[in-house]
Amino acid sequence: MGVAPGAFTDLPSSKALGNFERTTGRPADILHSYHRGDEVWPTADEIATVQQARKRILFANWKVAWNTTWADVAAGGQDARIDRAAARLKAFPGKLFVALHHEPENDVRAGGGMTARDYAAMYRHTVLRLRAAGVTNVVFVMVYMAYEPWCVQPWFGDLYPGDDVVDWIGMDPYLFARPGGYGHGDFAYLVDRTSDPAKWPGFYTWATRTHGNKPLMIAEWGCTSMPPTRRRRPGSIRRSASSSAGSPRSRPSSTSTRRTPPRATPGRTARRRPFRSSRSWPRRRCSR
């Protein structure tokens, strides 16, 4: 089990992770961090955190094309940015997971260098350039939002950059605490929900059928609630965690909570509200 502690706050990873583990009474196996553009990462604090007496795995998300476009990155416009990251990654003590622009579905546009094919080209170019620079300690993860309305879009298949540059496939599914609504259910529903199997089989089914040779990761998950249903969130999370054995192909998971669903504005990237720690996190360790 992993966690993205203190996301969208000024707390350093070490302090945020310590706060989370004290609140939940459970240790975390994975430290999940988020970076963009020219930010220096892995940070010194992240490195120190994963090197503590209790070893942890760093899982870093990097939006390579921050303040530019996927097509620009694919065309070599951000090679200097990638090369600086390569030097830091080679110096990182051990292996780590890296996701390149997680949840790209929300940012796909009809043009402007941000099509699904532009994303795949960006991902390929970045991975191949990092590897050419000598980066051998990174496990590259293709992380989908796994939101059904995106999965049935005609461009969805164009996002995948190729088996040679993807080591793991990830998904970011979220539950909703309101009974009877979309997104309310157990773990099997969380990872494989569909409103029409004829149009979309569910993300877990799609991933294991289409890319069955790739390990599958639950990169983010949690339970969203509005004020009237907030008291239902603990039970929703507990039920989901207790039923996770029914999806044996899913591996690490990073848990987080949201107050409200993310909102997307055309032409802009959806921004999440701050993650907040909770005393109702699942008391269950997931296999790596």
Image (cartoon, rainbow, N blue to C red):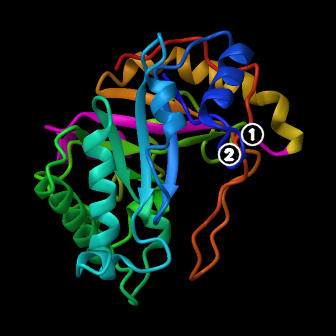
Q: Amino acid at mark 1?
A: Arg
Look at the image and tell me in which quarter the C terminus lies. Answer: top left
Residue at x 46%, y 65% (from the top left corner): 38
Q: Position of residue 148 (x, y in %)?
A: 46, 56
Q: Are marks 1 and 2 in contact (CB under 8 Å)?
A: yes
**Residue hosting label 2:** 181
Residue at x 29%, y 40% (from the top left corner): 91
Q: Amino acid at mark 2?
A: Gly
| Residue 186 in sight | yes
Vertical position of residue 74 compared to residue 226: above or below: below
Q: Position of residue 79 (x, y in %)?
A: 27, 72
**Residue hosting label 1:** 178
Q: In the image, which residues are magenta? A: 201-226
Label 1 – label 2 distance at C-alpha: 6 Å
Vertical position of residue 61 compared to residue 31: above or below: below
Vertical position of residue 108 compared to residue 156: above or below: below
Q: Is residue 13 left or right of residue 195?
A: right
